Amino acid sequence: MRLRLLLSVALLAVSGLGCALRAQDHPRPLSVTFVNPGKAGEVFWELVSDSMRAAGRSLGVEVETLWAERSFRRMQELGIEVVRRPRKPDFLIIVNEEAAGAPILEAAEAAGVKTLMLSNTLTGEDAARLGEPRQKLKTWIGSLVPDIEEAGARMARALVDAARANGLRSADGKIHLLGLAGDENTPLSLARNSGLLRVVFGEPDVVLDRLLNANWNETEGGLLADNYLQWAQRKGIVPAGIWAANDPIALGALKAARRLGHMPGRDIFIAGLNWSPPALDAVRQGDLLLTDGGHFLGGALSILLLRDYADGCDFAGPTPIRTFKTSAVTRERAEVMRAFVAGRQFERLDLARLRSRTGAACASRDLSVDALLSALSIAGDG
């Protein structure tokens, strides 16, 4: 009798384990709404949404995208409308563009909707008032932020290394650089600049002649680069490199350098950021030194974090503000990365396989772009 009882208990335990395993293999469907701050047709933010949806298909998450059309007021209206719906999503993803996030977070807290902030977190007075995720606002479960400062530093180091290797020094023995920033206000722009300045200040033989704001666009990047290169010529300075905060600025600088008789990739080096297909083409041809980025894949990573969280595996480690590392694409892998980005081949992101490979270590999961790409066998030294 006792033996039969023990066997019954054992069978129930095994049966329960089997159910748990099956539940993990076939997790319950989740719904996520993403308030995208960009405009439909804006390449970077379309890439974010596309990678998010591809990750959702891999992990059983239905993703809804709402476009704010670059209006912070519209962004707030959309976020607040979502959390007031009779049928609310399991999770909301927002971006703190133009400091629009705090009212949405507070509305989500009142409605009980768990919210993840992508690309940035609260700053200034909002940060002082509301603190970090899970402090005053319990439904604000975290932020996922790219390490853009390190990307800016990586770009600067690559320019300096290339200049040294090619002997691009002025008569003063220094390596002279031009910095073309995005703007002087947004946190991600300032973080990129900080990475550049960290490298410059740490290298006694490097001079940053100018750090100018190109407002993220190719035309202004080209005009500023043209003015600088003509100034350098008048002063007898050898312009070794141009650091550009994004790919359009880099491409504008590239055209200016060619117009003035330079041979980019040989007598001057230019680095950009964004992994845009035109920049990847220029890297493949040897005209641009590199394009850093891949941070649009934060869309896919955000879905991975929310899937983990919903399945009881919390992504928060010492802090619920998680950082992910971007990656530089140089000539060696520019062609394959261009095919991946331009073809929007995000279905190849096998997040289920990546998730099973790292097991239950959600708080210590490698949240780098290269780790995400490892499932595609196209990561590696960039």
Image: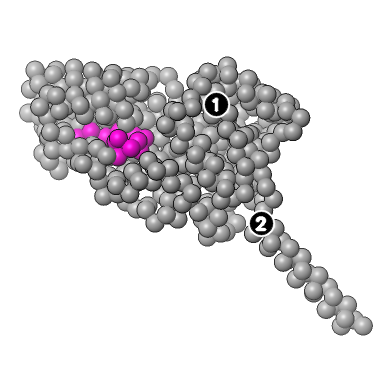
Residue tagged 2? 26
Contact, CB < 8 Å: mark 2 with mark 1? no
Q: Residue at x 20, y 37 (%)?
A: 287
Q: Three-letter amino acid code at disc 2?
A: His
Query: Is residue 356 depicted above or below 318 in this figure?
Result: below
Instruction: First in sequence, mark 2 or 1: give its number.
Output: 2
In this figure, what is the number of numbered marks? 2
| Quadrant assignment, res 355 | bottom right
Q: Residue at x 52, y 52 (%)?
A: 351
Q: Three-letter amino acid code at disc 1?
A: Trp
7 on left or right of 274: right
Quadrant where the N terminus is found in the figure: bottom right
- Does 279 appear in magenta? yes
Residue tagged 1? 67
* Element assignment for label 1: strand
The residue positioned farthest toward the right in the image shown? 1
| Quadrant assignment, res 252 | top left
